[in-house]
Image (spheres, helix red, strand yellow):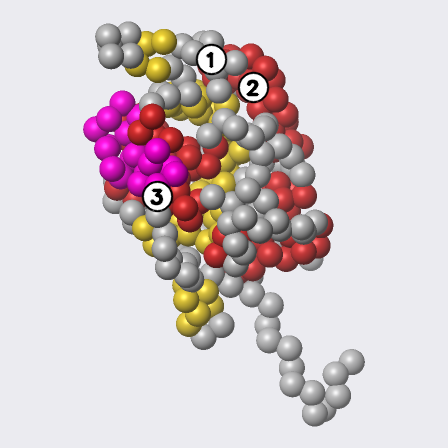
Amino acid sequence: MASAGDTPAPPRRTIPFADPESTTRVMLIASGKGGVGKSSVTVNLGVALAAAGHRTAVVDADVWGFSVPRMLGIGQEPQMVGEMIVPPEAHGVRCISMGFFAEEDQAVIWRGPMLHKALEQFLTDVAWDNPDFLLVDLPPGTGDISISLAQFLPRSEVYVVTTPQPAAQRVAQRAAFMAEKVNLTVRGVIENMSWFTGDDGKRYELFGAGGGQDLADRLSVPLIGQVPLIPALREGADEGRPIAAEAPDSEAGRAFSAMAAHLVENPPPRRIYRPELKIN
């Protein structure tokens, strides 16, 4: 017990997005494995939502493979105002990432409680200013981070990114099952690298076809979009020029705009908050 001369501990900050009255839609972008373009999808979807006039923010929760700041082209560091972190912004998207606190080639060797605390601070100690959408780029697979975020953000929607191959679809299904086990709702599937359009105007399905739709059918959710494989998408990610900002009228840019419109037009059912039923 603290003595009379001790300074009282500051009150513990709460996670604003966990409040039943919060108007922010929190979207966890998941994948069963790496290499499917999940972070690129997260960034470009965020940019497309911002371009449509919505206040948008991204949490880069892939603490071992952080890449969102580079993909957004953010060059400045977060600023401190009082005890709060003000996240930097690019293309209308605010962002916080482990990439601001570690070198890009530096390994982050954290597990369990340290990861849990870092993620909590990303949500409580950042001045997010009540965004309309908060996109969270999860690490691939399942693990401590996904479980922690399910505890922190119980009202989250989950969107699973996959590629057309049947093998990728089966792995992605595990991420969806993880979400269901921690009582999160999977609300859609996004298929990346769906086809390549050649100079002849024909579509070439380099990685097969139908994987995204098949996964969506298995999960009884919509396939909300298919993103074509184009060099400008990869180059833009490497150079901090998201295609949703640089070329919104391109084939991939239109795909992200259409997905953003789908998300806006299809909000989740509003859960009724009954404070009198709260268990003490």
Residue 56 numbered mark, or none: none
Magenta residues span 235-253
Q: Which residue is mark 2?
A: 168
Check residue 240 in the rendering and tell me which mark sits there, or answer none.
3
Distance in Å between CA atoms under marks 2 and 3: 27 Å
Q: Please, which residue is most extreme toward the front here?
A: 105
Kind of residue at badge 3: Gly
Estimate how packed mark 3 is, as few (under 14), some (14 to 19) or many (20 or more) residues with alpha carbons within 10 Å.
Answer: some
Q: Where residue 10 sits in the image (x, y, percent)?
A: 60, 75
Mark 1 element type: loop
Q: Is residue 152 left or right of residue 193?
A: right
Which residue in the structure is indicated by mark 1? 207
Image quarter of residue 257: top left
Q: Nearer the viewer, residue 255 or 55?
A: 255
Mark 2 surroundings within 10 Å by alpha-carbon count, few (fewer than 14), some (14 through 19), many (20 or more): many
Secondary structure, magenta segment, majority class: helix
- How far apart are labels 2 and 1 at the CA level? 10 Å
In space, the residues marked 1 and 3 are separated at their CA atoms by 26 Å
- Kind of residue indicated by mark 2: Ala
Give percent across and percent down for residue 146.
62, 41
Which residue is pictured at 23% across the width and 33% down the height? 247
Magenta stretch holds residue 209: no
Q: Quadrant of residue 85?
A: bottom left
Q: Quadrant of the N terminus?
A: bottom right
Amino acid at dot 1: Phe
Front of the two marks 2 and 1: 1
Residue located at (50% from left, 26% from top) = 36
Look at discs 2 and 3 and give the one toward the viewer: 3
Where does the image place residue 74, in percent across and percent down from the top left? 36, 52
